[in-house]
Amino acid sequence: MDQSSNNTFAGRLADESRSPILLVPYMWIGDFVRCHTVIQLLQARFPDRPVDVLTTTLCAPLTDYMPGLRQAIVVDLPRKSLALAQQKTLAASLKRERYGSALIMPRTWKAALAPFFAGIPERTGFVGEARFFLLNDLRFGERGLQRMVDRCAALALPSGTPLPAQLPVPELKVSPAEIAAWRSRRGLAAESRPVVALAPGAVGPSKRWPSASYAALTRRLLADGFAVWVLGGPDEKPLAAEIVGATDARDLTGHDLRDAILALASASAAVSNDSGLLHVAAALGTPSIGIFGPTSPWHWAPLNPLAATMETKNVLDCRPCHKPTCRLVHHRCMRDIGTDEVFAATRRALAAVAPVG
């Protein structure tokens, strides 16, 4: 090999060592937050390679607060069709970024299409839906990793590498200036009471602590001198109305996830079902109380430590079922969690960060 060939080969290796990495995460809010663990693992492994993430419009606000992320590529592909024309348009934009690797978290066929069409040299993902030609770094053993965060993290490590004893926890960083500006815009700048944010929504009714319980908790907190903000998407508007009632609690539900992020960053504590907003609150470092009924905290709770994990103390043979609706109708896994228990846990969390009274 002559000197010019040596230089070309060395240049190609240098380019590969700095080529960007594309992360294709799950697009549910909680799973999207979990993927910040993957970003940190990739940074530790490839310090000279920038990391980008594919995101939907819904999850895009999260990317503004994820340290170490270079950029987000926003695309809203339909859930129930391959949408080949849109996949090829996305692939063209990915090709311009000259990615060296893509980590594809979902096991679906269509999640791997755009990286394949873009010709990304290394496409890593677990075997699933017979997508053998779409991926060229196929991984096995996903079912042996029971936690979602472990499955995501495994793809960021060399094949066959054991997971570290401690994974980096997701982080979302919001500046005090942005919080202050948001409070001012929302008419909340004068609120001097410690704030408890409530997130009563969840995917599936079985994961929701009853709205009557949230309403009772709201009244207890207000009577004790705390402000209460109810958070969630537009589907949680009816829940928020039931919880707020005739009190001075604030309904902050709406279409923009950024509102919820900034509210949780501003709050003194958060109480949430097993939902995406619980992961957001925990990643922000807001003391968080997670309420778990049909799901197992070990499998699905944030990797970040929680101020408290609330579960029924009664033995239920049906739990955990991980079902979106209660097959036995009684919903005792949630109904048996008392307002007094959650109020006491919230009070303890608040006292730990700012003693009251």
Image (cartoon, rainbow, N blue to C red):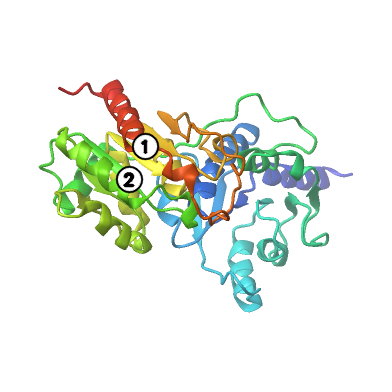
Label 2 belongs to which residue? 213
Task: State the residue in front, 230 or 174.
Answer: 230
Numbered tag placed on residue 55 in the rendering:
none
Quadrant in the rendering for residue 82: bottom right
- Res 47 seen here: no
Residue 330, x across and y down, in percent = 49, 51
| Precedes in sequence: disc 1 or disc 2 | 2
Residue 57 vs 172, above or below: the answer is below
Examine the image and state in which quarter residue 356 appears: top left
Mark 1 residue crowding within 10 angstroms, few (<14) / some (14–19) / many (20+): some
Q: Residue at x 59, y 30 (%)?
A: 167
Which residue in the structure is indicated by mark 1? 338
Left or right side of 130 for 196? left
Residue 272 appears at what percent x and percent y? 39, 43
Q: Is residue 105 left or right of residue 354?
A: right
* Side (left or right) of 356 relative to 25: left
In this orientation, which residue lies closer to the viewer: 271 or 119?
271
Q: Are marks 1 and 2 in contact (CB under 8 Å)?
A: yes
In the rendered image, the quadrant that contains the C terminus is top left
- Residue 201 is situated, as x and y percent measured from the top left of the image, at 40, 53
x and y, in percent, of residue 179 in the image? 25, 43
Residue located farthest toward the right when viewing the structure as drawn: 1
Q: Amino acid at mark 1?
A: Gly
Q: Which residue is painted at 54% across and 45% down in the image?
A: 294
Q: Secondary structure at mark 1?
A: loop
What residue is at 13 percent from the left and 51 percent from the top? 187
For the N terminus, the quadrant is: top right
Measured in 3D between alpha carbons, the distance from the residue under mark 1 to the one under mark 2, in whole angstroms, is: 8 Å
Element at label 2: helix
| Amino acid identity at mark 2 | Ser
- Tell me which residue sits at (17%, 32%) in the image: 224
